[in-house]
Image (cartoon, rainbow, N blue to C red):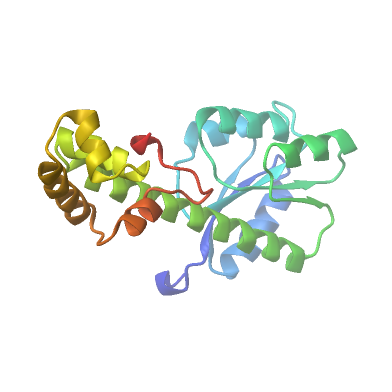
Amino acid sequence: MNFDDFRGHVYLIDDDPSICRSLAFTLSSSNYSVQTFDGPRAFLKDSLPISPAVILLDMRMPEMTGTELQHTLLESGRETPIIFISGESQPTEIIDAMKQGAIDFLLKPFSMESLMTAIENGLNKDRARQNELVRDMDIRQRFGRLTEKEQEICRLMIKGYGNKEIAELNGSAPSTVKLHRSRVLDKMGVETLPELIELTIDDKRRVLEVFN
């Protein structure tokens, strides 16, 4: 596979060897990298986090159900998007899988077109998640370059306090606060307060934890 044509990684978890072989061949031919696992325990033991990636997960397996593995991954903080593939499932299983964040549920036999669509949707979601993590790390690094006093003033700026209010709160002269505000904007890589406020908000429009 040409690396330039690489489309993403697929973890395939199914206890049916013939399905694993068939899907792995088809997906590899379509420029996905594929790892196959014969069950959830093998996946938990041997898989390494890769991004962008999706998990193709069978629902019914002897050692652990698909939703049980999904719950285990959520508990561990692993957020790789999951696509369920199943030959037979109860409505409650499908509902539980979707409530826990599965991006799709495909009943066997499914078309390759529907599978590819689900995989691309999952990869796009994982790319967005990874980009958000990188952005969050970059912002935390910028915030870490501020002095303790600048961090305090930065938090107050985000909450909407003006120079005089900040001066009254921390006992500084307004002129000193003004200087600190300028340094905060410079070190955070923005030019205005609205830009700083926008920088501190995540993709769900919540203020990042470091600024609370």
Q: Which of 64/20 is in front? A: 64
- Place of residue 20 in the rendered image (x, y in percent of width and height, measured from the top left): 67, 50
Residue 183 seen anywhere in this rendered image of the structure: yes
On the rendered structure, is 202 left or right of 42?
left
Q: Which of 136/171 is in front? A: 171
Q: Is residue 194 above or below residue 96?
A: below
Q: Residue at x 26, y 59 (%)?
A: 190
- Place of residue 58 in the rendered image (x, y in percent of width and height, measured from the top left): 73, 42
Q: Is residue 132 above or below residue 68?
A: below
Q: Residue at x 77, y 34 (%)?
A: 96
Residue 90 seen anywhere in this rendered image of the structure: no
Q: Is residue 202 above or below residue 99?
A: below
Q: Residue at x 24, y 62 (%)?
A: 191
Image-quadrant location for residue 90: top right
Q: Residue at x 60, y 28 (%)?
A: 72
- Place of residue 88 in the rendered image (x, y in percent of width and height, measured from the top left): 87, 42
On the rendered structure, is 6 left or right of 112?
left
Q: Which of 102/207 is in front? A: 207
- Place of residue 57 in the rendered image (x, y in percent of width and height, measured from the top left): 68, 44
